Image: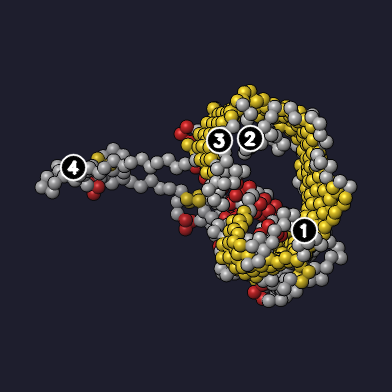
């Protein structure tokens, strides 16, 4: 809860176990109270108090901290925590310094130091439920850590690497991580990440290690209603007992639109696990096949049915999961679903098995982009708080009817700007001063327009009616959305509307469709960039802001018209042939400043750069 008057934020949270009377000591009842108070524009003071209450543990944890950002990219933190529980009391302190440096427009570097010290503790303090880690590999002990990272980002690729070392009383830990993401084409994007950890204990004991690698890809073939995803995970661990485990898991999923309301998804997972214990080797292979279908009952409500089968080479054999669900989209980019699996199974490695357990479950999906964040910030920012409307003074009571106010004599100023009268008819007559007027030739001035010279009448040219719309002579272009590669074969589209770009607009007039584009332009950053790029390529210096209602008209494109078609909220495009159905060939034509012919299809609001018949 934000308190703008005091530039502070208050946080209250409570976690209540649902399995019984707090008998699970790892997850006891937890209540947290906190407040963050800004100190000027450079610092923040934070106070947190946490209460844990369970059958086997009762504890209190108080944390007081200060964060300062003296200059851009720098963050200094200092925290002190006091924990008390049934076994004793512990007082600790942590200080840290983080610095981000932008080396160039595309390269950046981060570095940091952190130190934690247990200042005082009573008896043998036992951490039943560890505090939230300050860094990914912290525990309750003295330590000093340092990290260094480098990042790179351009229009189509981003990547980073980071190394960290932590020297603690129990041992030394080394961590290295890296990630990369790149869009290879308009339809194919890849991403990968890796993280390795080595822990060397100070006391007698073997070193432990762990390696995690993940590769993922998304393929959106030039088919507006099909998407394919694939993810490969590799995990290798070596524990202190000498046990080695290698796990390889691959998940592939496909989603396709049968029509505007009906979609079908399927998935296939493969897992191979190899374990070595005391010289003995074990292996197991498992397959998971699943499918789900969903149907939009209304614009906001959908129903679904899912089923899955997992077959393992181990003792578990074959297991099944199936059940119905219902979903609702209360607002844009948010989807909630509740379902019940009549049969089910559990597996922690297959992504598709996350909702395969027997019983009820709830799903939530949120598409979170810069526009969602902007709206959220508008709601929680102090600037969004509406000032109270000033109270209007009460109207004064009218005088009683019996009281007659004295009459007030009204005077008027005559046209001579000197004489004042109570009746305008008494004003003296002022002689009118003749005024010269400009004729239509913009040169001659006269007192009477009848004296203007006659201008030669230029006959109007009657426009020639064009049979069928004139389109573009397509070929290679430095504007991607106008470019048709030589020898490319267009894909025949059977219907429009499966992946709309700006939405269905059959019932809109040209002016109303422009207003629809303007709404998307001012409320969505991606749409704004796309429309500016398109209208700039059409010859308008200021981009989409130059668009006017007179530039939009209606027409039906000829059957068999081919061209570059946009599709989807992400504004992808492909070389395609329009459907044969006349309704799917209805379009809004947009007048350009350089002769380019551009349309927006009424069925879906998709952009279209049509080509003349060869």
Q: Quadrant of the C terminus?
A: bottom right
Question: Residue 175 placed where, x, y %?
Answer: 78, 36
Q: Residue at x 47, y 32 (%)?
A: 6
Q: Residues within 10 Å of mark 3 (few under 14, many from 20)?
A: many
* Residue with the mark numbered 2: 127
55 or 233: nearer the viewer = 55
Q: Is residue 53 left or right of residue 345?
A: left
Closer mark to the observer between disc 3 and disc 1: 3
Mark 3–mark 4 distance (CA, rounded to whole Å)? 83 Å
Instruction: Please determine whether, in this image, residue 165 is positioned above or below residue 602.
Output: above
SS at badge 2 = loop
Mark 4–mark 2 distance (CA, rounded to whole Å)? 89 Å
User: Which tag, 3 or 2, sits closer to the chain's start?
Assistant: 3
* Residue with the mark numbered 1: 251
Colouring method of the image: secondary structure
Question: Residue 247 placed where, x, y %?
Answer: 81, 51
User: Which tag, 4 or 2, sits closer to the chain's start?
Assistant: 2
* Residue with the mark numbered 3: 59
Instruction: Please determine whether, in this image, residue 235 is positioned above or below residue 493.
Output: above
Mark 3–mark 1 distance (CA, rounded to whole Å)? 42 Å
* Residue with the mark numbered 4: 408
User: Which tag, 3 or 1, sits closer to the chain's start?
Assistant: 3
Closer mark to the observer between disc 3 and disc 4: 3
C-beta proximity under 8 Å, tags 3 and 4: no
Q: Residues within 10 Å of mark 2 (few under 14, many from 20)?
A: some
Question: Residue 360 placed where, x, y %?
Answer: 59, 61
178 or 105: nearer the viewer = 178
């Amino acid at each position: 809860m934000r308190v703008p008057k005091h530039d502070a934020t208050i946080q209250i949270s409570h976690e209540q176990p649902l399995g019984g009377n707090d008998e699970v000591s790892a997850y006891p009842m937890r209540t947290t109270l906190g407040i963050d108070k800004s100190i000027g524009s450079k610092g923040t003071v934070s106070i947190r108090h946490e209460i844990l209450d369970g059958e086997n543990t009762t504890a209190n944890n108080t944390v007081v901290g200060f964060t300062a950002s003296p200059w851009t990219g720098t963050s200094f933190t200092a925290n002190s925590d006091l924990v008390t529980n049934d076994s004793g009391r512990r007082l600790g302190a942590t200080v840290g310094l983080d610095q981000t440096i932008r080396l160039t427009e595309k390269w950046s570097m981060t570095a940091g130091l952190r130190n934690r010290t247990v200042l005082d503790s009573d008896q043998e303090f036992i951490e039943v439920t560890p505090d939230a880690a300050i860094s990914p590999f912290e525990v309750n002990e003295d330590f000093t850590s340092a990290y260094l990272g480098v990042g790179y980002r351009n229009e189509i690729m981003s990547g980073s690497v980071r190394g960290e070392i932590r020297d603690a009383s129990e041992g030394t830990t080394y961590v290295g991580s890296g990630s990369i993401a790149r869009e290879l084409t308009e339809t194919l994007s890849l991403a990968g990440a890796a993280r390795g950890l080595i822990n060397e204990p100070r006391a007698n004991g073997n070193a432990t290690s762990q390696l995690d690698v993940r590769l993922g890809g998304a393929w959106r073939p030039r088919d507006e209603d099909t998407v394919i995803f694939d993810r490969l995970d590799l995990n290798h661990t070596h524990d202190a007992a000498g046990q080695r485990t290698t796990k390889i898991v691959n998940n592939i999923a496909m989603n396709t639109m049968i029509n505007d309301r009906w979609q079908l998804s399927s998935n296939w997972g493969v897992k191979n696990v190899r374990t070595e214990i005391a010289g003995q080797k074990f292996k197991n292979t498992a397959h998971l096949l699943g499918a789900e279908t969903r149907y939009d009952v209304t614009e906001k409500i959908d129903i679904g049915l899912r089923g899955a089968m997992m077959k393992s080479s181990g003792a578990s054999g074959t297991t099944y999961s199936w059940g119905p669900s219902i979903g609702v989209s209360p607002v844009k980019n948010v989807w909630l679903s509740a379902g019940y699996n009549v049969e089910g199974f559990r597996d922690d490695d297959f992504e598709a098995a996350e909702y395969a357990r027997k019983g009820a479950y709830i799903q939530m999906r949120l598409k979170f982009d810069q526009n969602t964040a902007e709206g959220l910030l508008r709601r929680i920012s102090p600037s969004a708080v509406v000032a109270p409307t000033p109270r209007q003074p009460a109207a004064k009571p009218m005088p009683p009817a019996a009281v007659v106010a004295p009459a007030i004599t009204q005077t008027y100023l005559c046209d001579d700007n000197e004489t004042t009268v109570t009746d305008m008819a008494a004003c003296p007559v002022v002689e009118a001063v003749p005024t010269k007027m400009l004729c239509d030739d913009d040169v001659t001035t006269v007192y009477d327009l009848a004296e203007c010279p006659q201008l030669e009448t230029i006959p109007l040219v009657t426009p020639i009616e064009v049979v069928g719309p004139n389109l573009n002579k397509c070929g290679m272009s430095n504007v991607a959305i106008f470019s048709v590669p030589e020898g490319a074969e267009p894909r025949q589209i059977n219907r429009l509307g499966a992946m709309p770009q700006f939405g269905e607009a059959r019932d809109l007039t040209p002016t109303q469709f422009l207003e629809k584009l303007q709404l998307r332009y001012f409320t969505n950053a991606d749409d704004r960039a796309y429309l500016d790029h398109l209208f700039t390529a059409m010859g308008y210096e200021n981009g989409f802001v130059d668009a006017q209602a007179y530039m939009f008209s209606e027409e039906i494109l000829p059957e068999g018209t081919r061209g570059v078609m946009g599709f989807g909220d992400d504004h992808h495009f492909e070389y395609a042939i329009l459907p044969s159905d006349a309704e799917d060939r209805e379009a809004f034509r947009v007048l350009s400043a350089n002769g380019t012919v551009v349309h927006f299809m009424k069925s879906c609001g998709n952009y279209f750069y049509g080509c003349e018949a060869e």
